[in-house]
Image: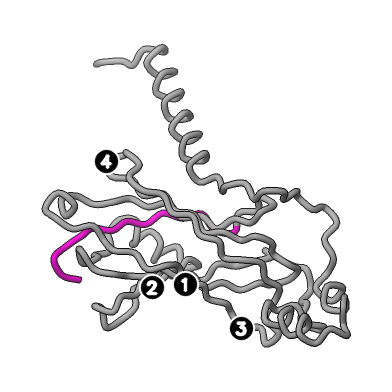
């Protein structure tokens, strides 16, 4: 019976740790110039009451969910990511991944989603702010093929407070065009997605996969 030497085991563990460190570095958001982590954030109601006589500023804050009485008790995660969705003018439905459903996430990782080659499509996320103000929320995804990084996307989602009516928000990202050609269609792509804010709070971190084909 063959045995694995201690040296080989150590090398394997070291390689695994190094790969994880590289993944974490890939998913690290870009620094916002001049931004410093704020340990003394005001509450939603406090922000709402600031400059209360400025109607235009008041309307702008309300559009971000910053309104008196919008604050909920500070329990659980500050922000909950609900779905990741893909839509395209060439597709008569949305492809939806329920981020809160472990079974669906496992399925999306195991069985690649089919994306038609050479077409325009958009990704979007839906999320709910449960309490407080989330500052500088970003969506980051790293795409790998055969373990090699082939693409990285980082999109600013923005800063939000709880919706006055308790509804979720949605944020659509710029239109992209899917790759095309026989080489692009061969094999599948693994994706790791993360939603994080300027203070380093991670609200979602999940994996899914896709493949390119001639049709959806």
Q: Residue at x 32, y 70 (%)?
A: 121
Neighbourhood count class around disc 2 (C-alpha, 10 Å): few under 14, some 14–19, many 20 upward? some
Circle 4 sits on which residue?
A: 146
Q: Residue at x 52, y 59 (%)?
A: 139
**Who comes first in sequence, dot 4 or dot 2?**
2
Count of numbered tags: 4
Examine the structure image and report whether residue 193 is included in the region drawn in magenta.
no
Neighbourhood count class around disc 4 (C-alpha, 10 Å): few under 14, some 14–19, many 20 upward? few
Q: Quadrant of the C terminus?
A: bottom left
Query: Where does residue 205 sit, x and y in percent of width and height?
Result: 51, 54
Q: Is residue 155 left or right of residue 54?
A: left
**Who comes first in sequence, dot 3 or dot 4?**
4
Question: What range of the chain is rendered magenta?
Answer: 203-216
Secondary structure beneath disc 2?
strand
Instruction: Answer whether labels 3 and 4 touch (C-beta < 8 Å).
Output: no
Separation of marks 4 and 2 at Cα, in angstroms: 25 Å
Secondary structure beneath disc 4?
loop
Secondary structure beneath disc 3?
loop
**Who comes first in sequence, dot 1 or dot 2?**
2
Of discs 4 and 1, which sits in the foreground? 1
Separation of marks 1 and 2 at Cα, in angstroms: 13 Å
Query: Where does residue 95 sit, x and y in percent of width and height?
Result: 34, 73
Circle 1 sits on which residue?
A: 172
Q: Quadrant of the N terminus?
A: top left
Separation of marks 3 and 1 at Cα, in angstroms: 16 Å
* Residue 190 tag number: none
Q: Is residue 190 above or below residue 72?
A: above
Q: Is residue 51 left or right of residue 172?
A: right
Instruction: Answer whether labels 1 and 2 touch (C-beta < 8 Å).
Output: no
Query: Where does residue 131 sit, x and y in percent of width and height?
Result: 73, 71
Separation of marks 4 and 1 at Cα, in angstroms: 28 Å
């Amino acid at each position: 019976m063959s045995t694995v030497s201690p040296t080989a085991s150590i090398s394997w563990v070291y390689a695994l740790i190094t790969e994880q460190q590289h993944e974490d570095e890939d998913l690290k958001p870009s620094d916002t110039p001049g931004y410093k982590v704020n340990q003394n954030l005001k509450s939603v109601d406090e922000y709402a009451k600031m400059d209360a006589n400025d109607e235009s500023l008041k309307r702008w804050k309300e559009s971000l969910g910053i309104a008196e009485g919008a604050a909920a008790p500070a329990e659980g995660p500050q922000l909950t990511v609900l779905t990741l969705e893909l839509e395209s003018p060439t597709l008569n439905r949305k492809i939806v991944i329920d981020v809160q459903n472990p079974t669906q996430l496992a399925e999306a990782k195991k069985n690649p989603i089919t994306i038609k080659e050479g077409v325009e499509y958009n990704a979007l996320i839906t999320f709910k702010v449960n309490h407080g103000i989330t500052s500088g929320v970003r969506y980051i995804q790293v795409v790998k093929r055969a373990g090699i990084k082939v693409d990285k996307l980082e999109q600013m989602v923005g800063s939000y407070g709880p919706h006055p009516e308790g509804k979720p928000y949605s944020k659509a990202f710029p239109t992209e065009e899917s790759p095309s050609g026989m080489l692009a269609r061969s094999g599948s792509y693994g994706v790791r997605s993360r939603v994080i804010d300027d203070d380093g709070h991670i609200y979602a971190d999940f994996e899914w996969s896709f493949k390119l084909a001639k049709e959806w």
